[in-house]
């Protein structure tokens, strides 16, 4: 089993966290301390789920499904930031590009895990 911090999806999620933090630097403090902090914490929970999914085979499917669902929610919330003009289109595009890449990797891992479970039955 690979160490979680060597996983491509983990590395992509860390890039996403950094890009999100960079893109939200100019958000007003009132929004930053509630909405943006909550989104940052949500990303941290997704990263944790990925680390746990790597470590715990029995819970992998559930953890990956939770991470995928949380990424979908995150994507919607980033769109809200754009629509309210709290982030730039350039920042939004960079976040979405990383988010989509990480989500594709999560879906791929989920599908391969599903096939693995199916083969074991």
Image (cartoon, rainbow, N blue to C red):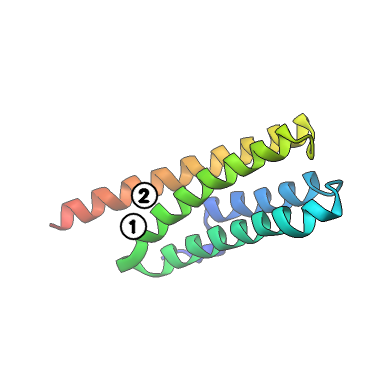
Q: Which one is nearer the viewer's eye here, 79 or 56?
A: 79
Q: Report crowding for label 2: few under 14, some 14 to 19, many 20 or more residues within 10 A (C-alpha).
A: many
Residue at (45, 49) in percent of width and height: 69
- Element at label 1: helix
Q: Answer with the quarter of the image where residue 120 lies.
A: bottom left
Q: Tell which of 105 and 65 is nearer to you.
A: 65
Q: Position of residue 104 (x, y in %)?
A: 47, 40
Instruction: Report the residue at 43% width, 56% height from top.
Output: 66
**Left or right side of 96 for 113:** left
Q: Are marks 2 and 1 in contact (CB under 8 Å)?
A: yes
Q: Is residue 16 visible?
A: yes
Count of all numbered marks drawn on residues in the image:
2
Outermost residue, left direction?
Answer: 121
Q: Which residue is mark 1?
A: 61
Q: Secondary structure at mark 2?
A: helix
Q: Position of residue 1 (x, y in %)?
A: 41, 66
Residue that appears at 12% across and 57% down = 121
In this rendering, is residue 56 above or below 36?
Answer: below
Q: Earlier in the sequence, mark 2 or mark 1?
A: 1
Identify the residue at the far top of this view.
Answer: 89
- Which residue is denoted by mark 2 in the rendering? 110
The answer for how far apart the CA atoms under marks 2 and 1 are is 6 Å
The correct choice, above or below, for 45 with respect to 97 in the image is below
The picture places residue 115, in percent across and down from the top left corner, at 24, 48
| Name of the residue lying farthest toward the front | 30
């Amino acid at each position: 089993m690979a160490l979680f911090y060597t996983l491509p999806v983990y590395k992509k999620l860390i890039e996403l966290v950094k890009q999100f933090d960079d893109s939200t630097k100019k958000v007003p403090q009132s929004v930053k301390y509630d909405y943006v902090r909550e989104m940052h914490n949500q990303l941290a929970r997704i990263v944790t789920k990925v680390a746990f999914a790597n470590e715990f085979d029995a819970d992998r499917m559930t953890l990956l499904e939770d991470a995928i669902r949380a990424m979908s929610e995150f994507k919607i919330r980033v769109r809200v930031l754009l629509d309210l003009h709290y982030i730039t289109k350039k920042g939004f595009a960079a976040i979405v590009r990383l988010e989509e890449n990480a989500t594709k990797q999560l879906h791929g891992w989920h599908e391969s895990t599903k096939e693995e479970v199916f083969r074991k039955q």
